[in-house]
Image: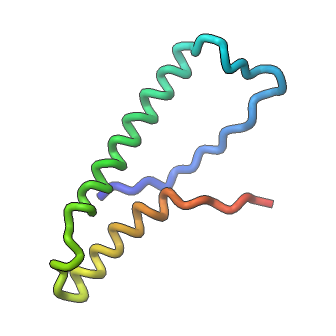
Amino acid sequence: MTTHSNVIDVPDPAPGSYNENRIAGKLLQSQSLHLREALIQHLGDVVAVLTIDPRSLKTEGEVSDYIHKATAILHTHASQPKGK
């Protein structure tokens, strides 16, 4: 399973610089494609864990491995506290 912990801080746009009706430029379109690819990678991780039936886990090691995989995915999607 692949986990990523890179956090990218994106500053708010300057007042008046955002126009929701303006045609998106190539950079924004490219960024949306990269985000889609990242989401697909996470989807594969989620599917891999969901294919495991927790009722089939018999040993503490199996349960521990399952919990580790599941919580690793959930922690990457958890809200991060705001810095002071």
Q: In which quarter of the image is residue 19?
A: top right
The residue at the point 37 percent across, 35 percent down is: 37
Left or right, 10 with respect to 44, comes to: right
Q: Quadrant of residue 62?
A: bottom left
Residue projecting furthest to the right: 15
Colour convention of the picture: rainbow
- Classify 77 as above or below 63: above
Foreground of the two, 6 or 81? 81
Check the picture and name the quadrant holding the C terminus.
Answer: bottom right
Q: Position of residue 73 (x, y in %)?
A: 40, 61
- Classify 53 as above or below 21: below
Check the picture and name the quadrant holding the N terminus.
Answer: bottom left
Q: Position of residue 25 (x, y in %)?
A: 57, 13
The residue at the point 19 percent across, 88 percent down is: 59
The residue at the point 26 percent across, 54 percent down is: 47
The residue at the point 52 percent across, 50 percent down is: 6
Left or right, 51 with respect to 77, comes to: left
Q: Where is residue 12 in the image (x, y as percent from the top left)?
A: 75, 35
Foreground of the two, 35 or 56? 56
Left or right, 76 with respect to 40, comes to: right
Foreground of the two, 55 or 37? 55
Q: Position of residue 77 (x, y in %)?
A: 50, 57
- Classify 22 as above or below 5: above
Image label count? 0
